[in-house]
Amino acid sequence: MEIYNDHKKLFTAALCLFLLLTFFVAIGPAFTSQNNNAPLPGSKPLSSLQTEGKAVFIAEGCVACHTQQVRNVEMDKVWGPRPNVAADYANITRTDVWRNTATLMGSERTGPDLTNIGTRQPGDDWHYLHLFNPRSVVSQSVMPSYEWLFDIKDYAWPNDVVVNVPDDFKKGISGKIVASHKAMALVAYLKSLKEVTLPDGKPVPLFLYGKTAAEKAGGATSKGAGTKSGPDGEALYATNCQSCHQGNGEGLVGAFPALKGSKVVLDDNAELQVTIIMKGYNGRVSEGYGEMPPVGTNNNLKPEEVAAIVNHERSSWGNNSKKVTVDDVKKIIASFDKPASVAAKK
């Protein structure tokens, strides 16, 4: 054929074929994939501070031990309310025209999955303590300390974020422990990691290998609710409360208050205790304790689960106060919407 003897025609034909194939094999599918995997409604792009925090997360090698993918297996239910879908990662865009960005899904879990860490741990104080010394909040943690993300100052400026580290974990430090800009950015990024609720009308993906309906109906004996079947108060406490208030209920001096011997827990009237779980609490900030987030609301705890947690706290570590019923909890939660709410009275 003449085309093989004419290098101009040959290279022109090869170039046109290459461009045609590039469109059909790469560009076309990329546009289709982008349109089919739009970000979920309610998801938000990272702010500038959170983007800086993601860079710190990468630089410190956090992805080596922490994943950001809730797999479709029963054992992953503790990390999120549903398995991840492609749309969960659709909001991850290029850092700039020169740099791509990583999804940070990870492949190993030496530490827990962080997909929903912003919901599980919404408070700043816990994150700063965990970064400065992981053993201060999780005694069995193997995570290294990231002390270099904090500054030691004799005096703190008004805008400084002072971390209240218990004396047992200060390692002889006498000054103020202040979070650096990198630490604040990293915490902002971690708090942004939250699973978004699927749009209304969309079925929530079910975890594989789940319990049968009969097994779920049987349930485990609740240690907190005092009924034959129902939520396990001890397990719920471990999931939602233990990281701050500790397994022994003694909290951390200077960081998180104790529940053992607490006046709130020992009060026969459970209104304040339930209110704190559902709406958070900042009444002891002046004593150096951080503000407690609304754990019950953030984690979508049902009245049955709140009752189980309350009763576990009321019957553990030497506490022995009046148990609450699910109906009691429902009435207290219902009162939040009334003008003369418990919070207003307090």
Image (cartoon, rainbow, N blue to C red):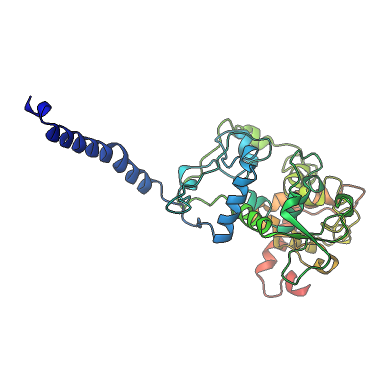
Location of the C terminus (image quadrant)? bottom right
Who is closer to the viewer here, 28 or 185?
Answer: 185
The quarter of the rendered structure image containing the N terminus is top left
Give residue 71's position: percent from left, percent from top: 56, 36
102 left or right of 268? left
x, y percent for residue 269: 83, 62
> In this picture, is 100 found above or below 44?
above
- Is residue 37 or residue 17 the one in the foreground? 17
Q: Residue at x 90, y 47 (%)?
A: 317
From the viewer's perspective, is 17 left or right of 87?
A: left
Q: In percent of the image, x 74 and y 64: which residue is there?
A: 161
Among the 4 quarters of the image, the one containing residue 291: bottom right
Is residue 286 in view from this perspective? Answer: yes
The answer to whether residue 241 of the structure is visible from this angle is no
- Find the residue positioned furthest to the top: 1
x%, y% of residue 334? 67, 64
In this view, the residue farthest toward the left is: 2
Q: Residue at x 67, y 75 (%)?
A: 339
Q: Nearer the viewer, residue 214 or 337?
A: 337
Q: Is residue 334 left or right of residue 100?
A: right
Q: Quadrant of residue 109?
A: top right
Question: Residue 247 location in percent, x, y?
Answer: 83, 45
The number of callouts visible is: 0
Location of residue 17 with respect to 150 vertically, above or below: above
340 to the left or right of 177: left
Closer to us: 15 or 162: 15
Q: Residue at x 60, y 40 (%)?
A: 67
